[in-house]
Structures are given as C-alpha cells and as structure tokens.
Amino acid sequence: MKVDKTKLSGVLIIEPKILIDDRGLFKETFQIDRYNEIGINLPFVQDNYSRSQFGVLRGLHLQKSHPQGKLVSCISGSIYDVVVDINPSSITFGTYVGVELSEKNHLQLWIPPGYAHGFCVLSKNADIYYKCTDFYFPNDEDGLIWNDTEVAIDWPIKLPLLSDKDKLLPTLDEIRNGVLS
C-alpha cells in the first residue's frame, strides 16, 4: 500500500495493493493493522454507498457536533473528490485538496474528522463507498458552498447538479465568523 500525505494535516491519498491476473483483480480495501500504521486509528461505525450520475456535485458537507472521519473509494466510474479545511484557527483554513478517485486508479481518500467534503461525478455514473467514524445525524449537518470564491476550487465541471440544500450552504467567510447554517 502506498500512502501520500497532502497539504492538509492528516488527509491522505492511499493506493491499495492490487493483485491482477487473468481471472480479474483483488484488493484489500481495509485492514485495521495496516491502516492503524498510517495513522487511521479511529473506529469505523457506519459504511455508506451512493450512486450519482454525471455532473452531480454532493457537498461540501460536514457535521458540526459529530464530525466524521471518512475513508472514501470510488468503486465504479470516476469522481473528483474535494476536502476543505474549515477550521478558522488552522494555518490551512480555506485550503483544499482535490483528487480523482476512480475504479481504474483504485485510490482511497482518508479525511479526518473536522473537514468539509464533497465530490462531483466525472463519468456517466459513479458508485462511491465510504467508511465513517461517527454516525450521520441529520440535525447536525452543515457545510461549505461548493463555489466559494475565496476557496476557489477548480472543479472539472462548471454547471453541476446540486440539491436544494447544497445550494444554500454558507461561505468560508460566514464560517470564519461563526455562522453555520
């Protein structure tokens, strides 16, 4: 397994070892000892799966009182996955990391608790699987608007399909000033 650190503290890009032969392939998507060795040692309590079509942008999401760490994989298709530091006291506040996750590159993205997270779909459809370190609490959800000009994420799609809820998320400036939706 290959692990690359990013410019955001604790955010890792993980390339699992893949065994390929004439029958297909095998990859280990999680093994507690190996992931503990690279610093992922929070318990996973919930697994999620989503399918989205081309152009869908989900996010940028977070939970206020119950922040979730997430281990994200794209098991079919391709997505551009983004993590943003939304902690106003952090030296990387407002900084983002973006990476393509796909069924072809097999990459995983580890997002520690406390970051905003979202993705857009680059293929006709994409299936995303992710493990979470805390449960989902609908009344605790919040986020960062996808097109915040201060963060200036270079999304590979220009006219994303958004939920009504995601269209109303706060800006980085509002987060800086303690205003979450």
Image: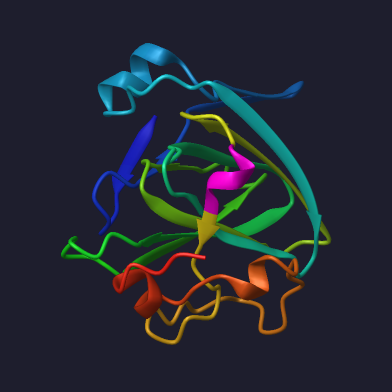
Left of 89 or right of it: where is 32?
Answer: right
In the image, what residue occupies the spot 37% across and 41% down? Answer: 113
Tell me if I can see residue 61 in this picture: no
The span picked out in magenta is: 137-141
In the image, what residue occupies the spot 52% across and 43% down? Answer: 107
Nearer to us in this view, 121 or 88? 88
Left of 103 or right of it: where is 3?
Answer: left
- The answer to if 138 sits in the magenta stretch is yes
In the image, what residue occupies the spot 42% across and 19% down? Answer: 43
Q: Which quadrant is the N terminus positioned in?
A: top left
**Magenta segment, prevailing SS (helix, strand or loop):** helix
Nearer to us in this view, 177 or 163? 177
Nearer to us in this view, 97 or 137? 137
| Residue 101 at x, y percent in the picture | 57, 51
Left of 168 or right of it: where is 162?
Answer: right
Nearer to us in this view, 15 or 161? 161
Tell me if I can see residue 144 in this picture: yes
In the image, what residue occupies the spot 74% across and 43% down? Answer: 50
Left of 141 or right of it: where is 109?
Answer: left
| Residue 172 at x, y percent in the picture | 39, 75
Above/below status of 48 relative to 146: above
- The part of the image, by quadrant, that contains residue 119 is bottom right
Above/below status of 109 relative to 172: above
| Residue 105 at x, y percent in the picture | 57, 47
